[in-house]
Image (cartoon, grey):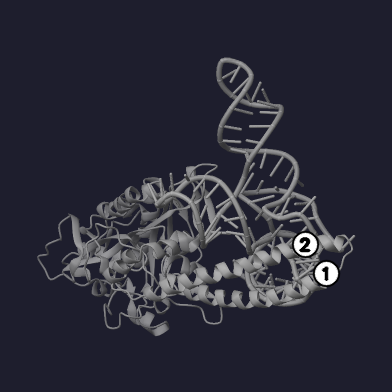
Amino acid sequence: MLDMRFVRENPEAVRQAIKAKGEKAALERFLQLEQQRRGLLQEVEALKHQRNTVSREVGRLKKEGRDTPKLIETMRQVNERIKELDRKQKEVETHLEKILLHLPNIPDPDVPVGMDEKDNLEIRRWGEPPRFAFAPKAHWDLGEDLDILDFPRAGKTTGARFVFYRGLGARLERALTNFMLDLHTSEHGYKEIFPPFLVHRESMIGTGQLPKFAEDAFSVAGTEYWLIPTAEVPVTNFHREEIIPGEKLPLCYVAYSACFRAEAGAHGRDTRGLIRQHQFNKVELVKFTEPHDSDVELEKLVNDAEKVLQLLGLPYRVMLMCTGDLGFAAARKYDLEIWFPAYETYREVSSCSNFRDFQARRAGIRYRPAPRSKAEFVHTLNGSGLAIGRTLAAILENFQQEDGSVVIPEVLRPYFPPAHDGIIRPGSA
RNA sequence: GGAGAGAUGGCUGAGUUGGACGAAGGCGCUCGCCUGGAAAGCGAGUAGACGGGGCAAAACCUCGUCUCGUGGGUUCGAAUCCCACUCUCUCCGCCA
């Protein structure tokens, strides 16, 4: 959420941001209502002032034993007017709040302006896409042939876009999760969090999923709960309505969670395989920083996520998202994309964003720079470190061999049974 | 699910016959004095949001409104009375 005063004083900047992100928002109506709000405020506050002084006077007179029916009668009338104005003002503020929650964050000045992924900027590449002397299989075929992924049975029990992992497939998923958590906690200095997978509406508003994108998330019928689309939601809201002592920043958290997404706008896309599931696992990195540190901390966060790919030996590239691909809440975003032989292209496995104070203002997360100073909003950042399902799919595809087996990356071997030789073969899982 | 207790400022903790103010005291913190330096001691200051005015603007100053879990109500006036809700704690029941 943007600061109401900022919007009032910088309407042009907001107008541009809305346009660059391809959003729609009632900015003009907002400015108009904001002016109306201040007018009402002044009128009602003057009346309340009158009420306060007169009430004090009544108290004084009563103590002296004097009756004051006239004053009380006029105050009754003033109160009627106050009630009316209060109601009107509340109406206006509710409307303002609603519009404010729909205004997108302002992109960083150096973010490329563009419509969609075609305008994203490649920052760097790492690793070489593998060359196969045979026709490589897609991960969903590998998964079924190796008997480690079972899509049909997931369809039978739950529906499309779900999967069972079995045997060494389940083991590999768990190995990846633990490997990433271990790496980020012991090498990169993140504190591990295991969050609730359900949150209430206010938390979803805090990070920006609601009110605008309700159709992208699942909610639990008959309750107020929403299934988290990412651990970003509970972990960022972990500090909601708090004032953090400045010396504790930056706070760096790493959290595993299952993630649930309705994928409402994705009918017919990525219908096969692990790429687009309603439920998937992810290890998420979340940071709370002082405003002047957030740029540096974002770069570090990206590097921490990249390290996972490097250690796994998966070829990837880093993309700087253009304005149209930034999303609603981010000011700056890098995507990490892994090479997928079956698609013959790079696909996203991580999205690392700086939200500046956009989420912090919504969720009320502040810090005190120095013991006596005024509390200010922190900057929040997060990034996948990484999406587990897509990483597993990439491992299957990139490390497959002609006989249909898959070689497990060296760094994951400690997470497999001691007797295992590091190769998943047909019939061995 | 049943019964009970509570929710006050950064923390702790007063404040329930409604009327002197965001609210005693303590801790913490800031500044000053003291000291060679520190501790102790002493003195002063220490909530936020919003709006108006001063200012080119920020800092700041000043006036006002609101905020004592949240929302409503009673009243000329509520932290203090009434209602609903949320959360925390204790006991009982149930349960992975």
Q: Which one is nearer the viewer's eye here, A104 or A428?
A: A104
Q: Which of A54 and A116 is in front in this view?
A: A54
Mark 1: amino acid: Thr
Q: For residue A58, which quarter of the picture?
A: bottom right
Are callouts 1 and 2 both on one chain?
yes
Most distant residue in the left direction: A133
Q: Residues within 10 Å of mark 1 (few under 14, many from 20)?
A: few
Corner quadrant of residue A315: bottom left
Horizontally, residue B1 falls left or right of residue A212, namely right
Quarter of the view holding residue A242: bottom right
**Alpha-carbon distance for marks 1 and 2?**
10 Å
What percent of the width, then of the height, locates residue A125? 18, 55
From the viewer's side, name the closer residue of A215 and A153.
A215
In this picture, residue A274 sits left or right of residue B59:
left
Q: Is residue A347 found left or right of A261 in the rendered image?
A: left
Name the quarter where the C terminus of chain A is drawn.
bottom left
Tag 1, which chain?
Answer: A
Q: Which residue is drawn at 86% across and 60% down?
A: A63
At label 2, the amino acid type is Glu
User: In which quadrant is the N terminus of chain A drawn?
Assistant: bottom left
Would you name the residue on which mark 1 appears?
A: A68
Q: Do the residues labelled 1 and 2 touch (CB within 8 Å)?
A: yes
Write down the chain letter for disc 2.
A
Q: Position of residue A71 (x, y in %)?
A: 77, 70
Circle number at residue A57: 2
The x, y position of residue B17, in whole percent, is 87, 63
Mark 2 surroundings within 10 Å by alpha-carbon count, few (fewer than 14), some (14 through 19), many (20 or more): some
